[in-house]
Image (cartoon, helix red, strand yellow):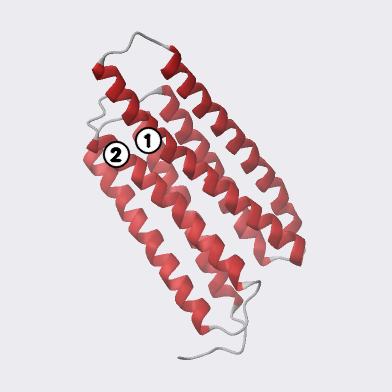
Amino acid sequence: MRLSLVPENRRFYDLIEGAGENMVEAARALDALLLNYSDIEQKLAHIHELEHKGDEITRKGMDELNQTFVTPFDREDIAFLLQHIDDVVDQIWAASVRLQAYSVQEITETAAAFGKIILGQSELISRGVRMLRDRKKMRDVLQFTQEVHVLENKADDVLRNALAKRYNSGPHTVETLIRGMKWSEIYTILEKATDRAEDIADTLQAIVLKYA
């Protein structure tokens, strides 16, 4: 195995930024699907392509970490960023494919709200990771991470309100109960994506504290 003794910082920044951009594209595709629930096959195919692209970026990043002796910041943080950015894309794909698998006919306001939140978090994270290259500007990342946390709290409220509405409304038929179970699973996956985004924000904050 070839080990590089000289830190090639650009390749790690490029990989992390590329992962962030891919996450934004996936979040935009999810948002487009939820706002205009048509041409489903084509939109799902696009999201699936982005999910594969995210996997490839993560694999390449892990290979680079194994071949590089010196990294621009802790290799654990690099690995965490790559893996969790990819996790957000994975959750986007998981939620999207269930819409088709569960024969969803109409998108709920809750699902659309989650789409907006995930897109907002993704855009903030993508902007934040691009600032890691410049140690003098690194502290500006904290502004974006705080906004990611605010959006995650909003996602918690969206999920809580959706579940409360489901269980406090009635009477229920077998059909409405099954539909509710399907949507509960989709909401949980979407909420997990917002949690992963918050984990990324926490790691970015830790990097700033170490190196800014």
Whether residue 105 is situated above or below residue 56 in the rendered picture = above
Q: Which mark is residue 76?
A: none
What residue is shown at x 37% (from left), y 9% (from top)?
Answer: 170
Q: Give the quadrant of the N terminus.
A: bottom left
Whether residue 169 is situated above or below residue 31 in the rendered picture = above
Q: Amino acid at mark 1?
A: Ile
Which badge, 1 or 2, comes first in the chain's sequence?
Answer: 2
| Kind of element beneath mark 2 | helix
Q: Amino acid at mark 2?
A: Arg
Q: Are marks 1 and 2 in contact (CB under 8 Å)?
A: yes
Q: Does residue 43 appear left or right of residue 186 in this picture?
A: left
Residue designated by label 1: 186
Whether residue 162 is situated above or below residue 80 in the rendered picture = above
Q: Give the quadrant of the C terminus.
A: bottom right
Q: Is residue 36 visible?
A: no
Which residue is more in the foreground, 167 or 195? 167
Residue designated by label 2: 98
Whether residue 60 is situated above or below residue 33 in the rendered picture = below
Q: Does residue 137 appear left or right of residue 41 in this picture?
A: right
Q: Is residue 139 visible?
A: yes
Which residue is more in the foreground, 165 or 149? 165
- Residue placed furthest toward the top: 171
Question: Splitting the image into 4 quarters, where does residue 79 fall?
Answer: bottom right
